[in-house]
Amino acid sequence: MLIENLIAQFVSIPEMEYNRHLQTWKSEVMTESQNEFKRRHSWFGFRKTDLYENIGHIANVPRIIAHSVQKKDLSKIITDEDSGFVLKEIYGHSGRQVKVLKRSEQTDSYFDLLHNECFSFEEISELYTATNSIIEESLFFEYEPIPIDFKVFCFNGVARVVLVVDRNLPKVGLVFYHVQENRLYPWNEIYLGRPDRLWDERCHLDSTTLKRIESAQVEAERLCAYLDVEGLLLSVDTYVPLSTPGKVYIGELTPRPGIVHGWWVRKEFLKYLFNLD
């Protein structure tokens, strides 16, 4: 398989030429991994409806309440009893195309917890009808208005790293977890240079967070066993309720994980991620 050959090439990159070849190598590996995943799973097309429609019967996937292509009046779908919901563009690839909306009874409006913006119901309706979007059930938790994201990076169906992202903090809380060694995975063991100033790497993992990480890992590996991911790198985005850490929701699958993009990645980390030790 081409992907196996590309991964095998990594260990043969001369140390003195590592940085020069790294970006090209990463691009080739991730492109081939993504293309191979799509070849094996014809239903996958980076649409926000893919998971609910295709794996919703074997995993907890947030329920899709409405789709704008149905041309239904949003006022007949969202009632006064609905405390909040999530608005997502079908082909959105980042948080910019997502609004986590919570209803304010005092102002009769909706506050976007993700971007700190306020919208009237009429404005939300206009956004919904003007774009190819879905309305998704909210996963609000009392102490986490925005659900903490547990991104499980699996190679060959086995969890290697978990990235915990907490967007409820003044700065985005960010911590990597080394699955095989059950420990914090410091930024400087993964990347060269300092983390983005907007991100705050927390220095500890409490017992509750560790339990949630374990649940996310188990569910991600269970899903990988259902899918055909042999030889592939896959990110499984999960949400784990604070009150019921054993229940895991699947938010997204990414066959081209961002963990190896952007910052210069250390060679030792890539060897661990692709199990080349």
Image (spheres, grey):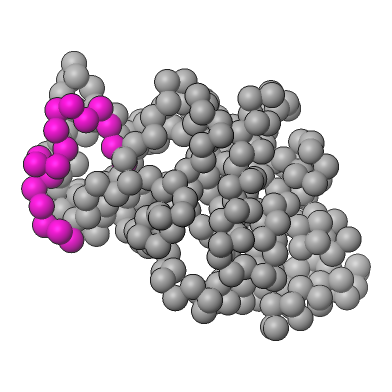
Q: Position of residue 253 (x, y in %)?
A: 51, 57
Q: Answer whether residue 14 is visible to the viewer in this image.
A: yes
Q: Position of residue 29 (x, y in %)?
A: 67, 73
**Which image quarter holds the C terminus?**
bottom right
Q: Answer whether residue 92 is visible to the viewer in this image.
A: no
Question: Residue at horizontal 56%, vertical 56%?
Answer: 223
**Which image quarter holds the N terminus?**
bottom right
The answer to whether residue 204 is above or below residue 33 is above
21 part of magenta stretch: no
Query: The magenta stretch spans which residues?
Result: 69-86
The answer to whether residue 270 is above or below residue 203 is below
In terms of depth relative to the viewer, which is nearer, 211 or 194? Answer: 211
In terms of depth relative to the viewer, which is nearer, 213 or 119? Answer: 213
Q: Position of residue 241 (x, y in %)?
A: 49, 31
Question: Residue at horizontal 31%, vertical 54%?
Answer: 89
Q: Quadrant of residue 273?
A: bottom right
Q: Position of residue 59 (x, y in %)?
A: 47, 50
Question: Residue at horizontal 63%, vertical 25%?
Answer: 208
In terms of depth relative to the viewer, which is nearer, 95 or 243? Answer: 243
Q: How many marks?
A: 0
Residue 244 placement, left or right of 205: left
The answer to whether residue 269 is above or below residue 116 is below
Please identify the residue farthest to the right as the structure is shown.
15
Please identify the residue farthest to the top as the structure is shown.
106
Question: Residue at horizontal 53%, vertical 60%?
Answer: 254
